[in-house]
């Protein structure tokens, strides 16, 4: 015969059986004490005291042995073992009932407890079979007493036996139904708990892998949670318990937002020695006044890069219209001015006007060419390059492109191997524009280079940089604020797009360009490149 399977894979009857065995052991001890102490002489063992005594002793010893087995060995019973235990329980109770006056005795109602426990621990058909055996045993005991004339003919013993049998079935059915409901509720709760744990783990993984930094502050502005992106943007390193006071600028912004619910300056300098900019936004987790604060951190360079791509796409559509609407009339004006200039009878004053028309049409045409060049620019494809090897090669190619009379003297300063990420073609275009500007304004002393290109790595941030240094007069303070604006120029012949294009190309590669003076007071354009390990 195969052993019975548990009611459910997630249902272990061990704990319930151990409690039930405690009850049976305690019941056996109480019956022995009451019998030996003659506490209920008219109830216990009135028909056969010896049978009652031996049955009680055996029942108690068996229960103690079962309890020790469950306690010490942690025996996990099968349905077969459970059925055997309940069968012994029913047989013992029937014997105790028989020795104490039959079904009319109150001991028979102990079978209700056994039937209820069977309904909780056994499967449906087995529990009903156990209840049927208990009922048959009670009726059989009453029939035996009737055959042996142990009960009067007018006694209601069979009625009591029938009522007890019905109660046994009712107990088994009721407790099995309740057990199934409880088990179903437990399984549903377990399923919901597993689903909630899965969703929580999934949400945690999503937050952890987000490129947007997430930081949570409690009511006292203590950092309770932050993801890897926040740690990277704020340069927290391996600090697992950072404090908001470690970033005074961020703390000031948080306190200002909590007081006024406004964030007038969302850009945060991540490190005083670095050039990384972080965009900061705040939100409340709850609607309460003193709720937790949620901080969103985003790499402003990446945002600028995305905005730049959108701007270029819009500019491309605009310049296509410009080329069609402006260049054709401009070509007609230029052609007409050339025809006028070929007239030999044209007065000198009119010839001067024709020259002005020609020079300005060329300037407008150059502006259109620069705009078209900007709009047609391909999407950046950053590559890892070694600046200490690439810059000397660029200087050689740049010098070779100049005539013999204009060939510049450019010095290169680049010591150790320097890795950087930038689109090679776009970096060449940026340096070409900056070198052209530098050579135009540079007035070097005798026996000095016209330009100096310096490459290195910032010690604090490990970010590479390139400096283009010239010996010119520099840029005035009033022009410095408009230096990288489109169409801003200090020359009548300039288009004002050269430095603007340099700035746009740098931002497309998550680099920053700025103007500064060196310690010697020389004019310098400083390009802060992204970290070589950063994903662009």
Image (cartoon, grey):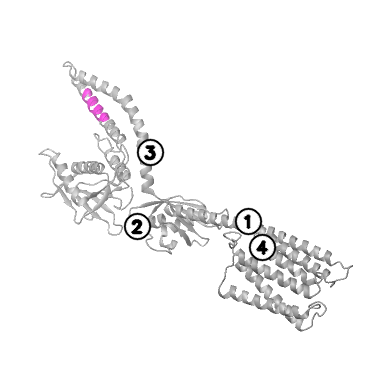
Label 2 sits on residue: 272
Residue for point 18% across, 56% down: 415
Quick one: SS at disc 4?
helix
Check contact, mark 2 vs mark 1: CB within 8 A: no
Marks 2 and 1, Cα distance to the nearest angstrom?
60 Å
Marks 3 and 1, Cα distance to the nearest angstrom?
56 Å
First to last magenta residue range? 353-365
Q: Nearer the viewer, residue 140 or 443?
A: 140
Disc number for residue 120: 4
Residue 261 appears left or right of 528: right
Q: Position of residue 48 (x, y in %)?
A: 78, 78
Disc number for residue 184: 1
**Labels 2, 1: front one:** 1
* Residue found farthest to the bottom: 37
Check contact, mark 3 vs mark 1: CB within 8 A: no
Q: Position of residue 57 (x, y in %)?
A: 70, 79
Marks 2 and 4, Cα distance to the nearest angstrom?
70 Å
Marker count (numbered): 4
Q: Nearer the viewer, residue 496 or 282?
A: 282
Disc number for residue 471: none
> Was residue 248 drawn as part of the magenta stretch in this picture?
no
């Amino acid at each position: 015969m195969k052993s019975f399977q548990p009611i459910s894979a997630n249902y272990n009857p061990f704990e319930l059986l151990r409690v039930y065995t405690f009850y049976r052991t305690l019941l056996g001890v109480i019956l022995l004490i009451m019998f030996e102490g003659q506490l209920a002489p008219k109830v216990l063992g009135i028909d056969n005291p010896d049978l009652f005594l031996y049955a009680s002793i055996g029942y108690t010893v068996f229960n103690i042995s079962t309890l020790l087995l469950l306690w010490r060995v942690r025996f996990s019973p099968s349905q077969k073992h459970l059925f055997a235990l309940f069968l012994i329980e029913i047989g013992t109770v029937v014997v105790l009932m028989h020795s104490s006056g039959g079904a009319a005795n109150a001991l028979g109602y102990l079978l209700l407890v056994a039937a209820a426990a069977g309904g909780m621990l056994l499967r449906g058909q087995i529990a009903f079979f156990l209840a049927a055996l208990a009922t048959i045993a009670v009726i059989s005991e009453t029939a035996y007493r009737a055959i042996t004339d142990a009960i009067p003919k007018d006694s209601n013993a069979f009625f009591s036996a029938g009522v007890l049998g019905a109660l046994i079935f009712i107990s088994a059915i009721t407790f099995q139904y309740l057990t199934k409901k409880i088990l179903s509720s437990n399984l549903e709760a377990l399923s919901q708990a597993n689903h909630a744990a899965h969703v929580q783990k999934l949400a945690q993984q999503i937050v952890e892998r987000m490129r947007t930094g997430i930081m949570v502050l409690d009511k006292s502005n203590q950092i309770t949670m932050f993801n890897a992106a926040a740690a990277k943007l704020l340069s927290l390193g391996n600090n697992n318990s950072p404090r908001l006071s470690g970033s005074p600028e961020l703390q000031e912004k948080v306190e200002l937002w909590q007081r006024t619910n406004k964030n007038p300056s969302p850009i945060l300098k991540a490190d005083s020695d670095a050039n990384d900019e972080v965009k900061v936004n705040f939100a409340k987790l709850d609607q309460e006044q003193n709720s937790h604060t949620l901080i969103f951190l985003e790499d402003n360079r990446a945002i600028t890069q995305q905005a730049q791509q959108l701007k270029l796409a819009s500019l491309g559509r605009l310049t296509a219209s410009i080329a069609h609407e402006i260049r054709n009339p401009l070509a007609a004006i230029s052609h007409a001015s050339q025809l006028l200039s070929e007239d030999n009878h044209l007065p000198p004053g009119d010839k001067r006007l024709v020259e002005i028309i020609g020079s300005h049409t060329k300037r407008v045409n150059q502006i259109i060419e620069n705009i078209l060049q900007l709009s047609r620019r391909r999407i950046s494809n950053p590559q890892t390059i070694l600046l200490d090897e690439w810059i000397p090669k660029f200087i050689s190619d740049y010098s070779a492109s100049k005539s013999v009379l204009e060939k510049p003297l450019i010095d290169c300063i680049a010591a150790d191997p320097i890795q950087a990420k930038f689109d090679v073609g776009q970096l060449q275009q940026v340096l070409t524009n900056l070198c052209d500007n530098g050579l135009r304004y540079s007035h070097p002393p005798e026996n000095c280079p016209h330009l100096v290109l310096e490459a290195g790595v910032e010690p604090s941030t490990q970010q590479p940089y390139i400096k283009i240094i010239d010996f010119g007069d520099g840029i005035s303070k009033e022009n410095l604020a408009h230096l990288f604006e489109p169409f801003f120029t200090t020359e009548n012949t300039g288009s004002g797009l050269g430095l603007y294009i340099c700035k746009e190309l740098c931002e497309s590669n998550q680099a920053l360009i700025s103007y500064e003076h060196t310690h010697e007071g020389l004019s310098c354009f400083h390009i802060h490149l992204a970290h070589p390990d950063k994903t662009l």
